Image: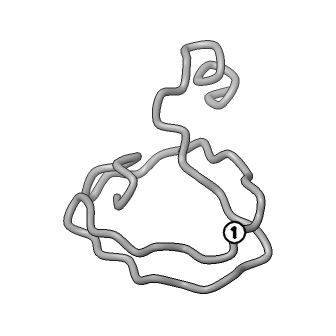
Amino acid sequence: MHAGAVQPGQTGPVVIEIMPRQASYSGSQANGVASRDYGPWDGSFKFVLNVDAKVQSKLSN
């Protein structure tokens, strides 16, 4: 919900992209969800919000 990949009460597949570790993570507030600042972590990811039709088709199979 925070990233806008799904809406409240919605379920379904989402696509993430694996990202490198960061020295720190900044909290934020979006879509009614608040996150906190966080220190270093071994890895990170981000939600891919604009998935093209070809990728969506592969996910549904």
Q: Which quadrant holds residue 39?
A: bottom right
In the picture, measured across the screen, residue 30 lies left or right of residue 5, that is: left
Where's residue 33, x and y in %? 27, 70
What residue is drawn where x is 58% and y is 24%?
56
Name the residue that disc number 1 marks. Answer: 22
In the picture, measured across the screen, residue 53 lies left or right of residue 33, that is: right
What residue is drawn where x is 35% and y is 61%?
2
Q: Quadrant of the N terminus?
A: bottom left
What residue is drawn where x is 54% and y is 26%?
51
- Name the image colouring: one colour
What residue is drawn where x is 36% and y is 49%?
6
Amino acid type shown at disc 1: Gln
In the picture, measured across the screen, residue 22 lies left or right of residue 48, that is: right
Q: Which quadrant holds residue 35?
A: bottom left
Q: What secondary structure is found at the residue carrying circle 1?
A: loop
Q: Which quadrant holds residue 24?
A: bottom right
Where's residue 11, x and y in %? 41, 51
Q: Please, which residue is most extreme toward the top here?
A: 54
Q: Quadrant of the C terminus?
A: top right
Q: How many marks?
A: 1
Give the class, few, some or many, for how many residues have Cα within 10 Å of label 1's Cα (few <14, many ≥20): few
Q: Nearer the viewer, residue 10 or 2?
A: 2
Q: Please, which residue is most extreme toward the left here?
A: 32
Where's residue 5, x and y in %? 41, 46
